[in-house]
Amino acid sequence: MEHDNNNDPLVIGGSVLQSRLFVGTGKYGSDAVIPEVCRASGSQVITVALRRVDMRAATGNVMQHIPKHMRLLPNTSGARDAEEAVRIARLARAAGCGNWIKIEVISDSRYLLPDGYQTARATEILAKEGFVVLPYMNPDLYVARDLENAGAAAVMPLGAPIGTNRGLRTKEMIGILIEEIGVPIVVDAGIGRPSEACEAMEMGADACLVNTAIATAGDPVAMAMAFGAAVRAGRQAFLAKAGPVLCGGADASSPLTGFLGEA
Amino acid sequence: MSFLRVVQGYEGADIPGAAQAVTEADVRRALEKPVLGPDEYLTLLSPAAAGLLEAMAQRANALSVQHFGRTIQLFTPLYLSNHCTNQCVYCGFNARNDIARTMLDEEGILREGEAIAASGLKQLLLLTGDAPRRASAEYIGQAARTLRDFFPSLGVEVFAMREEEYAHLLRCGVDSLTLFQETYNRSLYAALHPAGPKRDYTFRLDAPERGCRAGMRLVNVGALLGLDDWRRDAFFTGMHARYLQKKYPQTDVAVSLPRMRPHAGAFQPASLVGDRELVQILLALRIFLPRCGITISTREPAVLRDHLIPLGVTRMSAGVSTAVGGHAGETESVGQFEISDPRSVEEVCDAIRRRGYQPVFKDWEPLDGVCAVAV
């Protein structure tokens, strides 16, 4: 029997989401494809870099391409420290983008890896101000705990360095976060193929955010559809509880401890 | 430690000779490496690599799409002043050139700003000649304050400044710095800059680093291709960008690839950089520094610029005038050099879209308060 997504909602910051795939707005050859990507993926959450949004422009603005039903997840791309992230978040809210914010604090322009300390500082400030904070992070247990304690509504560990499409390179660390962290785990960055998103969901991740893999695909709309299906399949597999995998040797037909039952 | 130490480390090295010794197998090996070092970068600048441009282009394209997507940022220069105290032998603003000198007042700056803003552009590059007593850091800072309402992002391409002057410009709303070393060849540099403050090679070489220290978000370096052997200058340009990237990871580092253009003066370049050579430099740079911004200006003709889009370019100028007051059409001043792509902003945007790329007008704005955004 197919799993019913309506009975398995994802709740973040009090909002109920039926889709566990978040999509992005960056790197497309044309923003005009964004509505089709949203439709094909079934996603309900879309992240947008506030640095690229021109609130004063009536046209030529990425915002005009985002379907009304999508929940906006403005991000703080370009912030180099907590203070800049906080200012961008406040700008986003003042500009009418709602109170969800994805914290990105990156002060390394070569590798674009997130700064855990600055991210936690920004998360604490913004959570107290009533934002629903989703911080992008390295999959580090201590940082994740700090973020959870700081009031993060979810944490967003990277699967591989951002934009690389290299897949779930941090699988072991994400597995630990899934076990230990109480807020939803949204795997963000690095996922390059639908099978990798499916794997993250099978592991028990609560959602995936995919931008580059969709935006840079030969057919972004078809790839968005594939990711939507993969995330649903992975979630269904997680809920179905896969059978055990035997590690070495066979399932012995003559158990060594069988005699204990014969006594 | 300054980049001067890196340059000095190569003193006596025969860089063009080393490039000549590279084999096709060396190039193929370099192209298979995930991360390239300086030796591999020089390998990609070699004559042997010229025969493998398509393989380089495929990798450069993939890296560019991966890191920047199919997007091209647009900007345009605004010339504030053409007063200059230097005698750079290759430049139309040379103090000894008999051209009308002019400098925009606040009204003129506003008119230029309004004319450019009407084209839809959001990123502006402010330029002056090198005459700090006339077009001072204070004057440029005031111009930035005047223009901030029109343009979320302001850069400067002006004379080399002290760190506190860059910090002043940042407070006025400037967020990026472009500064070309012109040539990294120290003895040639001295010959090309016979008089004026720009003659100080080291002060200029260290200026991008001072900009990084002051907190500029983006620092753009480059050589004026054609002044010296292009392989040597392209090599040091890439090394300069790499040095800044490593030492100032919080700064976005970019490179421009300007070729010599005709100008008011008789100087002819020593080393001709053809289209194939320009493409080779662009590809080698992209593969060496995958996350480095690369700018191609209207020095290049429209057809070539359009073909370069998928090869690693991330920023292009559009709707350009190199004359003071040239955007509002209220000038008789001579431009710094002749441009080769006179298309309007909309025409450049159409060309970018035809290539399957998206023109990006805005990529940053100052963060000094919520009131900066009209809700």
Image (cartoon, coloured by chain):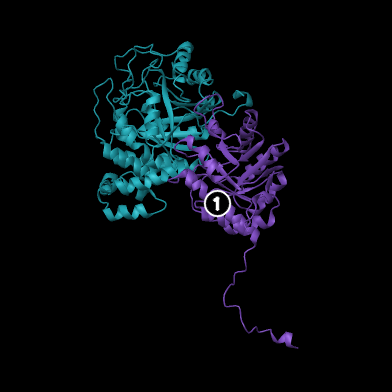
Circle 1: residue type: Ala
Percent of width and height locating residue A158? 57, 50
- Res A121 quadrant in image: top right
Rendered position, B305 above or below B5: above
> Where does label 1 land, which residue?
A229
Q: In this view of the protein, which residue sits in the foreground, B19 or B24?
A: B24
- Res B256 quadrant in image: top left
Q: Secondary structure at mark 1?
A: helix
- Residue projecting furthest to the bottom: A263
The chain coloured purple in the image: A
Q: In this view of the protein, which residue sits in the foreground, B55 or A80?
A: B55
Percent of width and height locating residue A26? 51, 39
- Residue projecting furthest to the front: A1
Is residue B85 at all visible to an observer of this figure? yes
- Residue projecting furthest to the right: A263
Q: Chain of mark 1?
A: A
Q: In this view of the protein, which residue sits in the foreground, A59 or B242?
A: A59
Q: Is residue A253 left or right of residue B168?
A: right
For disc 1, the neighbor class at 10 Å (few under 14, some 14 to 19, many from 20) is many
Q: Is residue A36 left or right of residue A13?
A: left
Percent of width and height locating residue B70? 43, 39
Percent of width and height locating residue A253? 62, 82
- Res A56 quadrant in image: top right
Quadrant of the frame with the C terminus of chain A: bottom right
Q: How many marks?
A: 1
The chain coloured cyan in the image: B
Is residue B229 at all visible to an observer of this figure? no
Rendered position, A181 above or below B82: below
Quadrant of the frame with the N terminus of chain A: bottom right
